[in-house]
Image (cartoon, grey):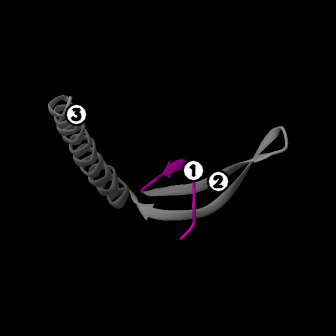
Amino acid sequence: MKYANGFTINATGHECFLTFLQTRPNGETKQTEEVETIVMTEQMARQMIVALAKVYNKVDSDRAAKKKVDVKENAQLS
């Protein structure tokens, strides 16, 4: 597994180039290096966008539901 904390996207023709980046402190500056580049079709890139949106909608709704439960439980404990 490779850790990345940034990315660039370059879409040309019917291909999408997704380059993962890793930025680390280097003294008083930051050093950014390319970790890996993935080339995919436009169709796959669009499918990935939709899939990630669905995943994070679910993550956000689960977090919101958990916060509501936690607040309610804390109020009952007081």
Q: What residue type is labelled 3?
A: Asn
- Quadrant assignment for the C terminus: top left
Q: Residue at x 24, y 36 (%)?
A: 67
Residue named by callout 1: 5
Q: Residue at x 57, y 66 (%)?
A: 2
Is-magenta flag for residue 13? yes
Highlighted range, magenta? 1-14
Query: Which sits in the foreground, 27 or 22?
Result: 27
| Marks 2/3: CA–CA distance | 40 Å
Looking at the image, tell me whether mark 1 or mark 3 is earlier in sequence order: 1
Q: Residue at x 22, y 33 (%)?
A: 74
| Left/right of residue 46 with respect to residue 69 in the rendered view | right
For disc 1, the neighbor class at 10 Å (few under 14, some 14 to 19, many from 20) is few
| Marks 2/1: CA–CA distance | 5 Å
Q: Which amino acid does label 1 sit on?
A: Asn
Pointers 2 and 1 in contact (C-beta within 8 Å): yes
Residue named by callout 2: 22
Query: Which sits in the foreground, 40 or 57?
Result: 57
Looking at the image, tell me whether mark 2 or mark 3 is earlier in sequence order: 2
Work out whether 36 lies above or below 25.
Answer: below
- Residue closest to the far right: 27
Q: Identify the secondary structure beneath mark 1.
A: loop
For disc 3, the neighbor class at 10 Å (few under 14, some 14 to 19, many from 20) is few
Is-magenta flag for residue 11? yes
Residue named by callout 3: 74
Q: Which amino acid does label 2 sit on?
A: Gln
Across and down, in percent, residue 19 comes to 57, 56
